[in-house]
Structure formats: structure tokens, C-alpha cells
Amino acid sequence: MKRTLVGFSDQDIQELDSLSALRRVSRAELIRQAVSQYLQKLKTAESPDLAFGLWANKAEDGLAYQQRLRDEW
């Protein structure tokens, strides 16, 4: 595991310390978890392949679905 230096505001440190006491984990572990979740969220949001094949398991044809929705207007 590599180390890095990061600066935080006094308020952020206080909140991290309160949360770390509540969860009974170190401040460093909270920050590792937060960074991991953030990176996973970015990876998921930026993946262009996520949309492909979304309709593959649907029983209704995509065009029919679109037309049905438009007919409601």
C-alpha cells in the first residue's frame, strides 16, 4: 500500500473523526473507503458499454414501447 499526503479542512477532520469513532475504524480507513467508492462510481458512470443491450431481455419491442409512450401524449 502506498501513502499520499492530502490536506483537509478542520471541519472535515472533525467529521471524519466523529464518523471513525462511530464506526470504530480509523480515519485512514474511512478515507480509503470513500476514495474506492468514488473511483468505482466514476468508472461506472463513464463506461459507454453500460447502455448496450439494456433492452435485450425485455418482452416488449423497443419501438412498440416508444410508440405506446408517445400515444399517451
Image: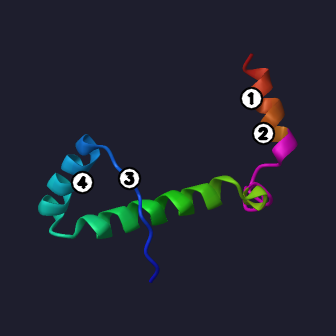
Q: Nearer the viewer, mark 4 or mark 1?
A: 4
Residue span colored magenta = 51-63
Q: Identify the amino acid type marked 3.
A: Gly
Tags 4 and 1 in contact by the CB under 8 Å rule?
Answer: no
Q: Position of residue 50 (x, y in %)?
A: 72, 59
Gap between marks 1 and 3, in whole Å?
Answer: 51 Å
Q: Identify the amino acid type marked 1.
A: Leu
Q: Identify the amino acid type marked 4.
A: Leu
Q: Position of residue 45 (x, y in %)?
A: 64, 53
- Report the magenta stretch's main SS: loop
Q: Nearer the viewer, residue 65 or 37?
A: 37
Q: Residues within 10 Å of mark 3 (few under 14, many from 20)?
A: few
Q: Residues within 10 Å of mark 4 (few under 14, many from 20)?
A: some
Residue 65's disc number: 2
Residue 31 relative to residue 53: left or right: left
Residue 7's disc number: 3
Magenta-span inclusion, residue 62 = yes
Quickly name the residue at label 4.
Answer: 16
Quickly name the residue at label 1.
Answer: 69
Q: Position of residue 35 (x, y in %)?
A: 45, 62
Magenta-span inclusion, residue 64 = no
Q: Is residue 41 above or below residue 25?
A: above
The answer to which of marks 1 and 3 sits earlier in the sequence is 3
Say which quarter of the image contains residue 52: bottom right
Q: Residue at x 70, y 54 (%)?
A: 46
The answer to which of marks 3 and 2 sits earlier in the sequence is 3
